Image: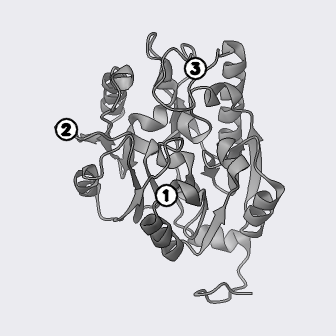
Amino acid sequence: MAFKGETEVTESNGDRDKMSRAIGKLLPRVLMVPPKYFKVEYNINPWMGGVVDQPKAQRQWDDLRKAIEKAGVPVQTLEPVDGLPDMVFVCNSGIVHNNKVFQSKFRHKERQGEEQHYIKWFKENGFDIQGADSKLCFEGGGDACFSTPDTLWAGFGPRTDKAVYEQIAKLGKFDTVLCELALPNFYHLDTCFCPVDETTALWYPPAFSEKTRKEMSVRLPHLIAISDAEANAFVCNAITIRNTVISPIGIAKETVNKLSDRGFNVVECDMSEFMKAGGACQCLVLKL
């Protein structure tokens, strides 16, 4: 049966994959930072607290890396720096589009020391870096994500300034969809929204303003709303790699079934140690 606004088709999943422009299908590689120095030693979001089991965090990070590679995308790594415990959340380093990167400007001083190390890596790996002169706060892939090369979902609120997207628009030709965050616990877009393909995403509706909810509903006909329990388990902090949605543990069977109906399988990764700092799967990965 065709969904509203769609033409009924009979292509196989393979045929649809060939036509897809979803970032998860096109993604050539990702960047990760090992958790060698990861710990919770300050409090800059409502989730932060507890003592990190470092060996367990390393195992969880390794499992996530293996899941990404098994799904079909190679992982590059950047060496961590002692004294920067949140550098492991490399998603926040910037937003990449066509070998250009708009660099982050962290709101909290505790993370600002990370910026120079990300910029150094981007330069060494041939990226055209933009945003150096910006005075506006922007926390990279935590608040901004492409569902396709033509559509940028632009979160703003606690960490990222709305006006920065006027500057980010200069990265290329794409539509920017402004997404206003409305709840303190969901301080980054990637805590409450996860694009799956061109028309599908996981989302937690209460985390957004009414205007944003309406806009998302119009643009994404196959939105999958998650429950309060799933939201608190960081299920929206998942990452889509090819036909696999890699999610923190806690995704409901109903949600898994809805993703399966859209042609995706789900792999769950234990992210308990990273959730002590307010992050999970997506936070640990920068899409290149």
Report whether residue 255 is seen: yes
Residues at marks 1 and 3, CA–CA distance in whole angstroms: 31 Å
User: From the viewer's perspective, is the residue at label 2 or at label 3 nearer?
Assistant: 2
**Element at badge 2?**
loop
Quadrant of the snapshot with the C terminus:
top left
Residue 13 x/y as whole percent: 72, 70
Q: Is residue 89 above or below residue 20?
A: above
Sequence-first disc among 2 and 3 = 3
Residues at marks 2 and 1, CA–CA distance in whole angstroms: 25 Å
The numbered dot on residue 208 is 1
* Left or right of 125 on screen, residue 212: right
Image point (76%, 44%), residue name: 250
Tell me the crowding category of disc 2: few under 14, some 14 to 19, or many 20 or more residues within 10 angstroms, Cα based. Answer: few
Residue 67 x/y as whole percent: 71, 39
Tell me the crowding category of disc 1: few under 14, some 14 to 19, or many 20 or more residues within 10 angstroms, Cα based. Answer: many
Viewer-side residue, 262 vs 53:
53
Image point (76%, 40%), residue name: 249
Quadrant of the snapshot with the N terminus:
bottom right
Q: Is residue 83 above or below residue 189?
A: above
Viewer-side residue, 235 vs 76:
235
User: From the viewer's perspective, is the residue at label 2 or at label 1 nearer?
Assistant: 1
Image point (34%, 20%), residue name: 113
Residue 23 x/y as whole percent: 52, 57
Tell me the crowding category of disc 3: few under 14, some 14 to 19, or many 20 or more residues within 10 angstroms, Cα based. Answer: many
Instruction: Read off the residue under disc 3.
Output: 35
Question: What's under tag 1, amino acid-wise?
Answer: Phe
Instruction: Read off the residue under disc 2.
Output: 135
